[in-house]
Image (cartoon, rainbow, N blue to C red):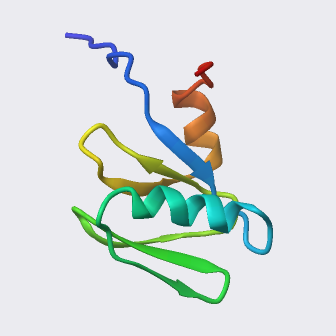
Amino acid sequence: MKYRKKPVVIEAEQWIFGEEGPSKVIELLQKTPVDYRFEGEKLKIQTLEGWITASSGDYIIRGVEGECHPCKPDIFEKTYERVEE
């Protein structure tokens, strides 16, 4: 059997250490009660699978259930496309 991912609109911001990204990422994380902390240039996010580290350049995704998790840029670009609001 083969399956296609259903089209779902998600919110995401790219985490780029030292640029505008951090404030937008923090806004995204604060929309849902999620624990997060900074360790140098790394951002650690408490996910359903435990603590996951986001590196500079990773996208932070807020999923359909409000969960947040990082996603590497190459996977993000293969999986998602921008939609107009």
Q: How many marks?
A: 0
**Quarter holding the C terminus?**
top right
Q: Quadrant of residue 43?
A: bottom right
Q: Residue at x 51, y 29 (%)?
A: 79
42 vs 51, left or right, is: right
Q: Quadrant of residue 40?
A: bottom right
Viewer-proximal residue, 25 or 56?
Answer: 25
Relative height, residue 22 to residue 10 (above, below): below
Relative height, residue 63 to residue 68 (above, below): above
6 vs 55, left or right, is: left
Relative height, residue 85 to residue 50 (above, below): above
Q: Residue at x 23, y 64 (%)?
A: 49
Q: Residue at x 61, y 69 (%)?
A: 55
Relative height, residue 4 to residue 50 (above, below): above
85 vs 2, left or right, is: right
Q: Position of residue 62 (x, y in %)?
A: 40, 47
**Quarter holding the N terminus?**
top left
In the rendered image, the residue lying farthest to the right is: 19
Q: Position of residue 10 (x, y in %)?
A: 44, 34
Q: Residue at x 62, y 19 (%)?
A: 84
Q: Position of residue 58 (x, y in %)?
A: 61, 57
11 vs 77, left or right, is: left
